[in-house]
Amino acid sequence: MTDTDFGRLHISSTDGVATITINNPPVNVLDVSLMSEIRRFLLSARDDKNTRVLVFQSADPEFFIAHVDMTLIDEPHAFDDFVHEAPEALNPFQAFGELLRGQPQVTIIKLAGLARGGGAEFISAADMIFAAQGRAGLAQCEALMGITPGGGATQYLPGRMTRGRALEVILGADLIDANTAERYGWINRALPEEQLDGFVDRLARNIAALPEGVIAAAKKAMPRTDLREGFRREHDAWAGLFERPAAEKLIRGGLKAGAQTKEGERNLESLLRGLKI
């Protein structure tokens, strides 16, 4: 696939490394269109034997993927097409993360800005994550909207950090800086901003240059936990809370207060904490 196949992704390929740049202004909200394009790219890349590494980055230095589109509250059926395409027992957001987690290529996130909610869940499904000190931040802020994560966070985070830290991330609902995320195990490394591009580019090229079969063998040898039962529990918890009046009031209140705008998203946690149920 080429750039002409996408409106929100820019794709470049060199020496076995495909770099996917996300561009969905103003804050890279994970809406139906962006999710569809990323999904379509991942499916097409599965059988691309010439591409060994996928590097995801953002065209916006402030935001990687803000979170799932909060206007879902007004369009509850917007993701219905994904429901039909999702594997059994997975909701569309869980299936989205599992598609990334199951890619044959090595998947790398280059995080220079902020990622929350569904954006943070997408990141957690990748093989490796590298983030810029002083700029990057991760959050599972769903609790501030009266819900719990519904796209994989409850299953992915305990594989990256202790149960207590995963609960802190989900229930504390704070923005976690790159250094703390590295210490907790959420990401591979926190790097000085000026070193991020060079480090990730070198690593991706080195991995892509490995002898044929090495990447597949290494990924196959790694334990792959079956998360289906956990995903079912996660979905039931999320869906049950999403239907409650508090969630609707908080999500609508967040949108009215400036969520999904650049100004509102820069300190989204404070914006949401200031809402009254």
Image (cartoon, rainbow, N blue to C red):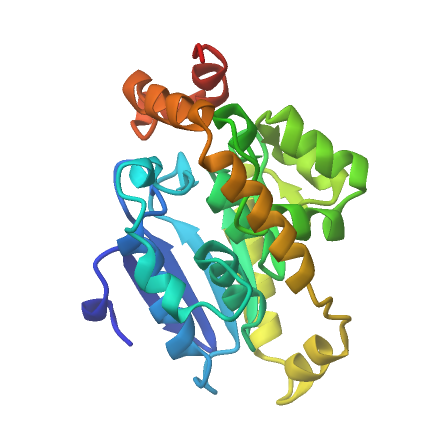
* Observer-nearest of 174 and 236: 236
Which percent across, then down, holds residue 105? 55, 75
161 with respect to 181 (left or right): right
Q: Quadrant of residue 14?
A: bottom left
Residue depicted at x 39% and y 70%: 85
* Observer-nearest of 127 and 171: 171
* Observer-nearest of 258 and 233: 233
Which percent across, then down, holds residue 115? 48, 39
Q: Is residue 187 visible?
A: no
Residue depicted at x 74% and y 53%: 159
Which percent across, then down, holds residue 262? 31, 27
108 with respect to 6 (left or right): right
Q: Is residue 25 visible?
A: yes
Above or below, comparing residue 202 to residue 109 in the picture: below
Residue depicted at x 45% and y 86%: 47
Q: Quadrant of residue 186?
A: top right
